Amino acid sequence: MSPVLIALGSPSSETLLARHADQPKSVIGSYCGTGELALDALDVTVAGVGPLGTSISPALAQALHAASAPAPHGKRSQTVLDTDVRDTGQIPAAALALTWGEGGLAQLQDRAATALGLPGVELRAHDLLVYRKGQFFKPHQDSEKHDGMVATLVVVLPSAHIGGQLRLTHGKLSAQFDSQHLHADTLRWFVFYADCRHEVLPVLDGYRVVLSFDVVAPATLVDAVAPLSAELREALRLEFFPEGAARVKPWVLLLDHEYTEHGLRWALLKGADRERVLALATAAKELGLQVSLGLTTIHESWTAEYDEPWESNRGRRGRSSHSDDDNDHDDDDVQRGELIEGGTVLDFWVDQRDHISRGKELHLREQDVHAFSDTDDSFLVNQEHEGYMGNHGNTIDYWYRRAGVVIQTPLASEVNRFTTEFDAALADALVLARQGTVQATLELTQRLAAVTPILGSARVASGRKLLKPYVELACALTDPALARSLYEGFDWISFAPSDAVPISVLATYLGQKPMAALLRMWSAPQRTASDYFWATKAKESPRAWPSPLPEFVKRSQAAGLAPPLVEILFEQALAAFVQIDRALAHAGPLQWQASLATRLGALAELGTALQLAANPQPVLVALVGHIEQHHKLYPLTQLGPILPVFDALPDPSPTGTLRKTVILELRAALSAVPRAPDDFGMPALEWGCHCRDCAPVIAWAKAPTNAPLTLPLAEARRGHVQDALQRVSDQFDFAVLKQGSPHKLVIRKPTTLHAQASAMRQQWEFDLAALTRA
């Protein structure tokens, strides 16, 4: 057990008895209590029946029962009437008139508060319940009917009866209140927290008449004050400041009672929870620790076992689930076997001023979560059973909801906010970075060092959006390794022109040589051939550099990035361009065609950016040489619109030979006889497969005919032919004629071949005229 729990302990029986010394015949517990009032402390008058007096006769009790209506009960989100669960008569509070003797209500409220360990409570009449012989209420829990409702109190009125005991359970604790009597000389009352599971046993004889009250705690905030325990303070010091270093993980004590998001408030803490939380808060305050309340979700996954032999369950399939309102959570024949995995997360917080905050889930380590009571079915909110599914299954999962008190060092609080409220935590870190003091830098270093993995994950998820704040944080640090962890992981293809300023700031911080290495690291080819293959198959342009590159270069120069570093931008852009082409060279003709327009656009973008370079010649020479070596990727007849971009450079002479070659190729293309109106041949396609099934397709595609080709082929052979054609061109149309055996594959040529040829010829004429004029 944690030293903190040992120091905290449980409320002692002596303390409890001293707290209830003024309540003779009391049953003392941290979750319930009982006591007595004088018979004349309360007069009850029921509309239509009259005053009940200090002794309810059998005839008057019978009249009460006749005036009552069958009482409903809650089931899931509904209110239902089911006498198999609840069988009793109910008279609503609106039909009751209560007259208290002098000081009677105040005394009862004070004693109920004391029994529950609360500073004060308010009683609100709920209803009058009349149980005749044989009536009962099966085990259940009360719901929160009012803001601040924490408990239920019942006053047993003086009506003779036998049986009707009230049984309570709270975790492993239990209590029973007997109200039976033949002649009452006092009014008995019982109070218990609303999350206690309770039942009324059947009345054996007579009438059990009780007045039910909702117990509401005051909504006003109270400061967490309790006597300071030196032992508890020392235990917390050792837990949170081992060897003088501040703990960076939260410490959580799960509470014994159940709380909802609506009911988890400092003023509404129940029983022993209240005493423990206040004691912890007092000791934590002495150490400068932060304390809050929170709600956790506990998930456990178990192997599922069955009551009957496995052989009879071999065919079991499917899933079953239960909501948090089911009374019987387990399938009858399913039992939990071995624990597979489990985890606890925090997702709801209430600070000491009752301010609520929600954020992303904060995962807790098992060693950081403590409790005085087990997490049992009273906290269960859902379960799912997945039966045998062939290769997995036979599991049963449970989800529990428990409140807890969360204690953290200020450092841990800031560290954890990077998980639960990343943007706010980052903003606070930037405030520290801008202070520039030694103390602020030390605190910033502690925070960031503790969340390096979180910062890295955020960078992967958000990319360039974090470049500016990360650069600002890095420049405020004196720890080079920690600074590198902030700025090294960016991928430059995501950068935009607005990122030029933080890049220039970082270059000033690092110096020219380290920044050159960083630029090469950011821009190192990280894509695979598969990445580019799928991008071009989807007719998308795989990005190669910050876009648009000319504007990015212009902004970088304006921000003061040194010329040698700007030159590295061009070198790396060229390297990325070449790498894309090398990857696509293995993709095939269809991908070359599909990506040609975007690659020519990238080529023009790089040429435009080169116009800003101080010395564009090395990159230009390498770029022209690359194009001349890859005519399959860059057909000469398609380069006409690109060459004028290079003409704007101070010295475009490296493009001279390429220009002449392009002009010759355009003239040769224009000198060819135009496509005849009845010619639908496609001879220029590059075929990869020439098997016995593909050979007739190739001959048909090259022939001028426009008639469709019909091939009777089995399914596998049809698929092969279709795949082979789709690797060559995406213009063919396919259909399967399901007649005869085998079915027939019908292939049609595109109807736009003549329009495409005409448009291309017009483009060639325009490009040739422009090039010859130049």
Image: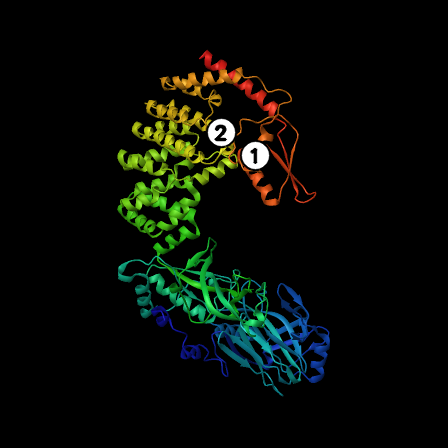
The three-letter code of the residue at mark 2 reads Leu
Residue sticking out furthest to the front: 692
Residue sticking out furthest to the bottom: 182
Residue toward you, 743 or 219: 743
In the rendering, at what x and y percent does residue 534 appear? 49, 39
How many marks do you count on the picture? 2
Q: Quadrant of residue 729?
A: top right
Is there any visible trace of residue 95 in the rendered image? yes
The circle on residue 695 is 1
Q: Residues within 10 Å of mark 2 (few under 14, many from 20)?
A: some
Residue toward you, 9 or 635: 635
Tag 1's secondary structure?
Answer: helix
The answer to whether marks 1 and 2 mark residues whose Cβ atoms lie closer than 8 Å is no
The residue positioned 57% from the left and 21% from the top of the image is: 759
Q: Is 118 above or below relative to 351?
A: below
Q: Which residue is mark 2?
A: 596
